[in-house]
Image: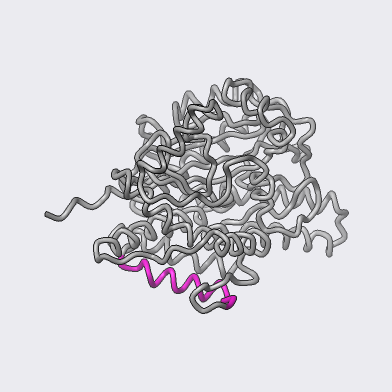
Amino acid sequence: MKSAEPPFTVGIEEEYLLVEKESRDLVVDAPPGLLEDCEKRLESQVSPEFLQCQIEVGTTKCDTLIEAAGEIAALRRCVAEVAGTYDLAPIAASTHPFATWESLKHTDKERYNVLARDMEGVARRLVICGMHVHVGLDDDDLRIDLMSQVSYFLPHLLALSTSSPFWRGERSGLKSYRLAVFDELPRTGLPETFDSFGEYQQHVDVLVKAGIFEDASKLWWDVRPSARFPTLELRIPDVCTHVQDGWAVAAIYLCLLRMLYRLKGQNQRWRRYRNLLIEENRWRAQRYGMDAGLVDFGRGSVVPYEDLLEEIINLVQEDAEALGCWKSVQSARRIVKRGTSAHRQLATYETARAEGASHQEALVRVVDFLIEETVAGLDETTDISLQKSLPRAPSISAS
């Protein structure tokens, strides 16, 4: 008897930085009423993050990507509206163009207090934001199996999302400097490979028993089995400044998982590559984004990113049509054509400098671009009204 197909539900989380509209710098002491006002409208779908200058939103468990896209757009709009009443604005960028971390304060919450105590200076530098995508897979062993296979595609997804080219007022030379900061934490990066959920749990239990952490939510891998939900959680992307770019990344991840599941039903699987090889593509995506290509391990050569993306789009077309997100998958081509947020931030800076702006003035103009772009395109979802009341079901949230 053929087993039922996994639900392939979708949940999306996004983290934003809060900037002062006058200075364009990060807020140091977030107004207490800001989160309270957001919670009045969004309840459990909004939460504080590690630093007071951050805020996180999360959709409910959605049956389709279109539904999740509509929710994340509505959540962005709400945060922007509430923040505006405090002369603040959210920016969907994984680093701030010129902020420094020394004066920032972490949120007074037990989980964050423990993180600050245990990690010291490493934690204080976490002025970074990301996007997480949960896909519902209700079989434990299937989550572990697909985690090892989808790891191959993690650099491809990172390259589509990059939004952190600046750090402390300087061009970092990386399209995703966020990963350079986050990788200083333990238990980050590519996931380990396990043959079963039982083997995975045995290894987690060793660290729990030793008192290293209380549960697997402290495994901050690029993709991981969620410790709270029956989902496989993508964590490698930068948060996308334009909301539709985030939909494209989420759609491709969702469809890749269905494609791998479909292959499994045909007694096939994606070849498992060692982390040594995938790490090289991860670095290339972090450093160059889409600009310098990634290694095709089968060919043994670097291939232009645009060609690799076309191969992925062709691979998942059947799955995208079945899941109703073919349009979002194809929209990834638009990202390649016009560039990610990182490309556009750098272009904004260079244009400002060419027009005579000082270094700091050009950085301020980048912040202005981010403020505007964060709320652009929020009315362009299809088959869903963004004006409907947000559902009050528990959000998908796993910090």
Query: Percent from the top left, x then y, of residue 220?
Result: 54, 41
Membership of 303 in magenta stretch: yes
* Pick the front one: 223 or 10: 223
Could you tell me which residue is drawn at 55 percent across and 62 percent down?
A: 278
Could you tell me which residue is drawn at 62 percent across and 34 percent down?
A: 54
Could you tell me which residue is drawn at 83 percent across and 60 percent down?
A: 353
Query: Percent from the top left, x then y, of residue 57?
Result: 50, 36
Membership of 178 in magenta stretch: no
Q: Is residue 363 left or right of residue 209?
A: right
* Pick the front one: 155 or 377: 155
Magenta: predominant secondary structure element?
helix
Q: Quadrant of residue 158?
A: bottom right
Q: Quadrant of residue 205?
A: top left
* Pick the front one: 115 or 291: 115
Could you tell me which residue is drawn at 32 percent across and 50 percent down?
A: 142
Q: Is residue 109 above or below residue 371?
A: above
The magenta region covers 301-318
Query: Percent from the top left, x then y, of residue 148?
Result: 43, 55
* Pick the front one: 73 or 176: 176
Q: In this view, does 124 lie to the left or right of 379?
A: right
